[in-house]
Image (cartoon, grey):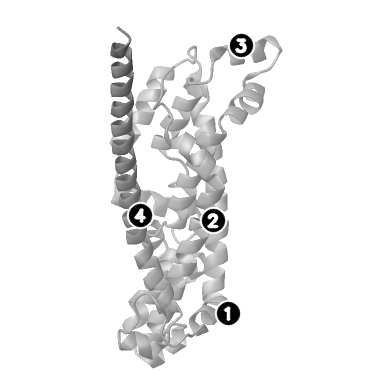
Amino acid sequence: MSTTPVNLSSRHIKDGMIKSKKTKVGDLLIALLCLILMLLCLVPMLHVLACSLSSPDALVRNDVFLWPKGWNMEAYHTVLTTEKYVRSLWWTALLTVGCTLLSLFLTICAAYPLTYSNLKGGKFINFIILFTMYFSAGTIPSYILLNNLKMLNTPWALIIPNCISVFNVIIMRSFFYGVPDSLREAAEIDGAGPIRTLVQVYLPLSLPVIATLALFYAVGRWNGFSDALMYLKKSSSEKYWPIQLLLYNVIKNSTQTSEQAAQEGFFSNGVSKTIQMATVMFATVPILLVYPWLQRYFVAGVTIGAVKG
């Protein structure tokens, strides 16, 4: 009579061991896949870094892959000492920070009132917001509008058109919906108005989504290129070029003759490629350094609504 429980327990142990082995094998396969994907992402960056630290002759011979040949820091010295590059880097950093703060402010101001069920016209406002996400005027009407507003070739052309994202407003609104109504009611009983409730109740609880949206806005603005290419056409607007547009012009002008390139601050052949790669590193690394600071908030922010209850 006593052997049956023993046999059952031993069978359960064996099944548990088999499942644990399968789980370990699955974890190893996932870890291996993640490692492969990580290497695929790192190889291009390592190649660019190696090219930026190599001699122009090695680049002309295509001898550089993942390790620099003929170590040369001249490209970084050029980028850090040439006024055109330094100004573009500082302007891009200032533009990114300013646009991110403005976008977060406008996103919060747009999303918070929509959480009130007694908001007059709330359903119509939600419809208009969603409508603009699915249907937009297009590039040419936007260009004509900015031209009529005298915003072309000014920094406002990089700030105003993309200062708010409808998708991010919906994310922020969805997060605000998840805040218990009892917290708002308790604040209102204590005499807090809507603004004080937002500042003291909603915003402290919204750090994950705020950090996530800040990262989205910052990456979008730092990597912004097409708007600057379309709206900053005149030579007088060159001081407002973000780093991505400057990098585009570096690559475009790399086909010029050495004399023309030297006069304009650009370079040719191998020297041009080292400058290009160094500029790519300066255009990529700063925004990558932001991710570790926001990682703990980012995971929680991108999983909003994934778990109920």
Give the SS element for disc 4.
helix
**From the viewer's perspective, is the residue at label 4 or at label 1 nearer?**
4
**Which residue was labeled with disc 4?**
35
Of helix, strand and loop, which one carries label 2?
helix
Q: Looking at the rendered structure, which numbered label has been put on residue 273?
A: none
What is the three-letter code of the residue carrying label 3? Glu
Name the residue: 34% across, 29% down.
Answer: 130
Q: Quadrant of the N terminus?
A: top left
Q: 55 left or right of 22?
A: right
Which mark sits nearer the N-terminus, 4 or 2? 4
Distance in Å between CA atoms under marks 4 and 2: 35 Å
Q: Nearer the viewer, residue 195 or 269?
A: 269
Q: Identify the mark nearer the N-term, 4 or 1.
A: 4
**Image point 32% across, 45% down: which residue?**
30
Rendered position, 133 above or below 2: below
The structure residue drawn at horizontal position 63% and vertical position 21%, both measured from the top left corner, is: 197
In what element is the residue under mark 3? helix
What secondary structure is marked by label 1?
helix
Which residue has dot 3 on it?
Answer: 185
Residue matched to label 2: 95
Q: Upstream in the sequence, badge 2 or badge 1?
A: 1
Residue 241 visible? The answer is: no
Type of amino acid under label 2: Leu
The spot of residue 64 in percent (x, y) is 35, 81
**Distance (Cα) linking label 2 and label 1:** 21 Å
Q: Which quadrant would residue 65 be assigned to in this image?
A: bottom left
